[in-house]
Image: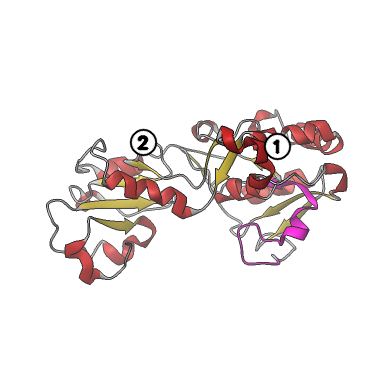
Amino acid sequence: MITNNREDLSQSDAVLFHFTDKDLFLNDLPTKRLLSQVWALFINEPNIFVQESFTPWANVFNWTISYRRHSTVFMPYGMYEPIPNELLPNVSRINPPIYPAQYRDKMAYAVVSRCADDAERYRLVNEISQHINVDYYGECGNLKCEIKHNSCLPPNTLRRYRFRLAFEDSNCRDYVTEKFWDTLSKGIIPVVNWKAAQRDIPVPPNSYINVYDFPNIKSLAEYLTKVSRNSTLFQSYFKWRDHFQIYTSFWNSFCKFCTALYDKSVPAKVYTDLEGWLRDDYCQRFTVS
């Protein structure tokens, strides 16, 4: 059972602290803790913009839970796994057939609501738009989202697009969010802006196109045009769907945390240098020309 009722603290196996809500809990930590109780810091965003020091909170947390692979519990925004052999004959029930490229009348779309960010998505989308047609949604674009969801658009509109510019707002270690995973689930090819520190996250093979695999934006645009006109090449980015299934729900990943509570192989520790762990979040700046 998961609850936010503080009266249940004395009966809880673990207490989860959400990093984004640090202003709410750092000055109001529980005064007592059971010896068997795990205090876990949950981080789902880079701490690149965090200015305050966490040195006073050394020796408080036992576990870290985040999208970073060296966390105590690795909890990515999405994950994939092989489809069991016994289900392969009915794979279309798991991954419905992809809408053919020739019936998609729109090239690409992007959704950006924060115009100034560490990865300079706004600039990157504008540069790509000089070479191919990009429908630009969100606060930074000229179009408004039609639904309140990460994908921004309803299924009947999404199926018209070949690509989504699924750019992360920060190029930090292991930071691959729902922008990528949701795009995969919608049957659209994600165009990503991953740098070296993000490339090792486990994702389906040949499922995306990376800006940084091209010498410049013009070369990227030429390749996107090539893919859009070649149905065989377009379909090759969905071959993974014949063998793998993806999970995008937060609760699928959260199961890892619950499992870890009962897994004796998960190390018991105390973060004596929480500040050092948080700051060890390698990030790179925007460099594409």
Q: Earlier in the sequence, mark 2 or mark 1?
A: 2
Q: How many residues crowd around disc 1 within 10 Å: few (fewer than 14), some, or many (20 or more)? A: many
As helix, strand or loop, the secondary structure at mark 2 comes to loop
Residue 51 in the image: state x and y as whole percent: 36, 53
Q: Where, by quadrant of the figure, is residue 86 drawn?
A: top right
In the picture, measured across the screen, residue 135 lies left or right of residue 179, that is right
Q: How many residues crowd around disc 2 within 10 Å: few (fewer than 14), some, or many (20 or more)? A: few
Q: Can residue 288 be seen in this view?
A: no
Residue 147 lies in the magenta stretch: yes
Report the residue marked by disc 1: 238
Whether label 2 touches label 1, CB < 8 Å: no
In the picture, measured across the screen, residue 55 lies left or right of residue 283, that is left
In the picture, measured across the screen, residue 184 lies left or right of residue 136, that is left
In front: label 2 or label 1: 1
* Front residue of 157 and 272: 157
* Number of dots carrying numbers: 2
Kind of residue at badge 1: Phe
Numbered label attached to residue 70: 2
As helix, strand or loop, the secondary structure at mark 1 comes to loop
Name the quarter where the N terminus is drawn: bottom left
| Placement of 121 over or under 221, stated as above or below | below
Numbered label attached to residue 94: none
Residue in the image at 40% along x and 37% along y: 69
Kind of residue at badge 2: His
Residue 250 in the image: state x and y as whole percent: 47, 54
Name the quarter where the C terminus is drawn: top right
Residue 201 in the image: state x and y as whole percent: 50, 35
Q: Where, by quadrant of the figure, is residue 30 drawn?
A: bottom left
Q: Which range of residues does the magenta coloring cover?
A: 146-166
* Front residue of 51 and 24: 24
Residue in the image at 80% along x and 53% along y: 160
Residue 94 in the image: state x and y as whole percent: 63, 45
